[in-house]
Amino acid sequence: MSVDLDDLDQLIITRLQENARTPFSKIAKEAGVSEATVFLRVKRLRQIGVVKAFRAIVSPSKVGKSLTAFILVRADPRKYTEVLSVVRNLVEVTEAYDVTGPYYLILRVDVSNKESLAKVIDLIGAVDGVSSTETAIVLKEVKENVGIKL
């Protein structure tokens, strides 16, 4: 369900996506409203689920996870729930998407090296219900955008 956002909501969201640590006082000054107004708007945006969380975005390579790959998974639909359960618990899987098309899942994994990737691929391939996987190793990041343009 889409939510109607006014100009102030959009400004607040834009500034917080640029830097979640932006002081409410700075946003308030830019918007020409009180700091309390910004605080209440952020609180409301969180309550209605527009703002899901505030978190640090960590560079995988800076913490020893220099290899990123996408694993495309084909699965038996009768065992798909079990496949999802296993995938959710793999710490190497940083993103997982249920998709349409010939694959059931697309997984992003961040690991330290090729050997670690091979272990993850083997683990996923051994899950009862996984019929096949295909892996693409990321050579370089072309674009990363964790924000939504409003």
Image (cartoon, rainbow, N blue to C red):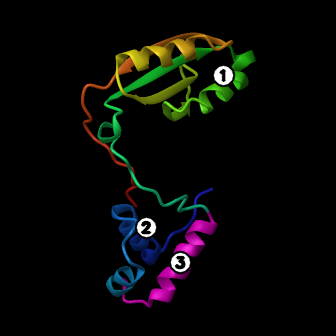
**Circle 1 crowding by C-alpha within 10 Å: few under 14, some 14–19, many from 20:** many
Which percent across, then down, holds residue 5?
50, 70
For the point 42% across and 75% down, which residue is it? Answer: 7
Front-lying residue, 78 or 23 = 23
The quadrant where residue 130 appears? top right
Q: Which residues are magenta?
A: 31-48
Residue indicated by mark 1: 83
* Mark 2 vs 3, N-terminal side: 2
Q: Looking at the figure, which quarter contains the N terminus?
A: bottom right
Callouts 1 and 2 close, C-beta under 8 Å: no
SS at badge 1: helix
Image height of 137 relative to 44, above or below: above
Image height of 94 relative to 138, above or below: below
Q: CA distance from mark 3 to mark 1?
A: 39 Å
Which percent across, then down, holds residue 18?
33, 62
Which percent across, then down, holds residue 13?
43, 67
For the point 45% across and 30% down, which residue is it? Answer: 108
